[in-house]
Amino acid sequence: MSSIKHVAIIMDGNGRWAKRRFRPRIWGHVRGSSVVSEIVRSADDLGLKALTMYAFSTENWSRPLDEVSTLFRLLRKFIIKERTRILQNNIKFRVIGELQSLPHETVELINEIESLTSGATGLHLTFAFNYGGRAEILRAINTFQVTNPERLMTEADLSELMYRPETGDVDLMIRTGGEQRISNFLLWQMAYAEMYFTPTKWPDFTPREFCKIIEHVSSRERRFGSICEQVGLNSSVERADTNKSAYFQGVTFNV
């Protein structure tokens, strides 16, 4: 069984894909939106626990107004189009980010589908929209300070205050379009994520390539700071403690 349970995707290359075809950038986003549905279906078929897709960052407001408006419309269109399939397939849907900047009707639609799928036990599907990783961490820290002024924050505290703590850490981050950076995406959750950068631009990304990437990354050895000879964390810790005891027996330290 694959160790990859949570996949995060930066859907990049829509504008460049369109530009190479002498089309407006908007056309690339529209074409790319159909790929989203295909990849969601593929993730669900593969039995992934979570799929988080970066649709619009807090930095994307600098783009032309018509492009930003198109991205808003495409989010709304996706929810309307996929609503029935999401419900039928027991998918738990959520949008994370600063949603107060979105059109009111879109926020209402998001709230409705989130409420309807709140009890779903299948794929955790998340769209990061008007999202920034640093902003998410700052939001969590500020929330903790207000509610817990007398104690220090732990890693567990911070993890629980992320937008969607139940999805856990990211196992694999895929970025399409050829760029090799994470662009302020899920900074806390990707501490030990495997990275895969493909030159394929998002409108050309297929379920076949998606599955091949997961298969390839699943074959990697994920050591989480350990070494390949260690069979398991618990046995390794026990072995290390025993070795330390044996090593230091009879050793005298001059202080």
Image (tube, helix red, strand yellow):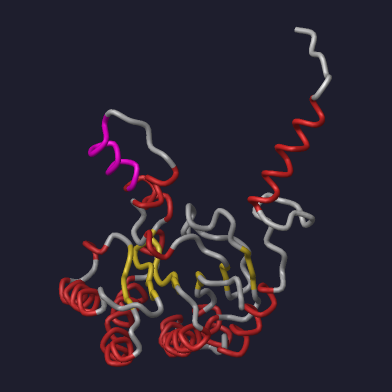
- Would you identify the image quadrant in which residue 110 lies? bottom left
Nearer the observer, 18 or 29: 29
Q: Taken as a whole, is the magenta stretch helix, strand or loop? A: helix
In the image, residue 94 lies at what x, y percent? 31, 71
Nearer the observer, 126 or 4: 4
Q: Look at the image and tell me in which quarter the N terminus lies.
A: bottom right
- Name the outermost residue toward the top: 255
| 105 relative to 135, above or below | below
| 22 relative to 126, above or below | below
Q: Residue at x 63, y 72 (%)?
A: 178
- Would you identify the image quadrant in which residue 241 lies? top right
In the image, residue 71 lies at what x, y percent? 35, 77
- Would you identify the image quadrant in which residue 59 lies? bottom left
Question: Residue 237 vs residue 64: left or right?
Answer: right
Question: Residue 241 vs residue 29: left or right?
Answer: right
Q: Residue at x 41, y 82 (%)?
A: 26
How many badges with numbers are in the image?
Answer: 0
Does 85 appear in magenta? no
Q: Residue at x 38, y 59 (%)?
A: 165
Q: Residue at x 80, y 8 (%)?
A: 254
Question: Residue 134 vs residue 13: left or right?
Answer: left
The segment highlighted magenta reads: 140-149
Question: Residue 233 vs residue 57: left or right?
Answer: right
Nearer the observer, 104 or 193: 193
Q: Look at the image and tell me in which quarter the C terminus lies.
A: top right
In the image, residue 82 lies at what x, y percent? 32, 89
In the image, residue 249 lies at what x, y percent? 80, 24
| 24 relative to 3, above or below | below
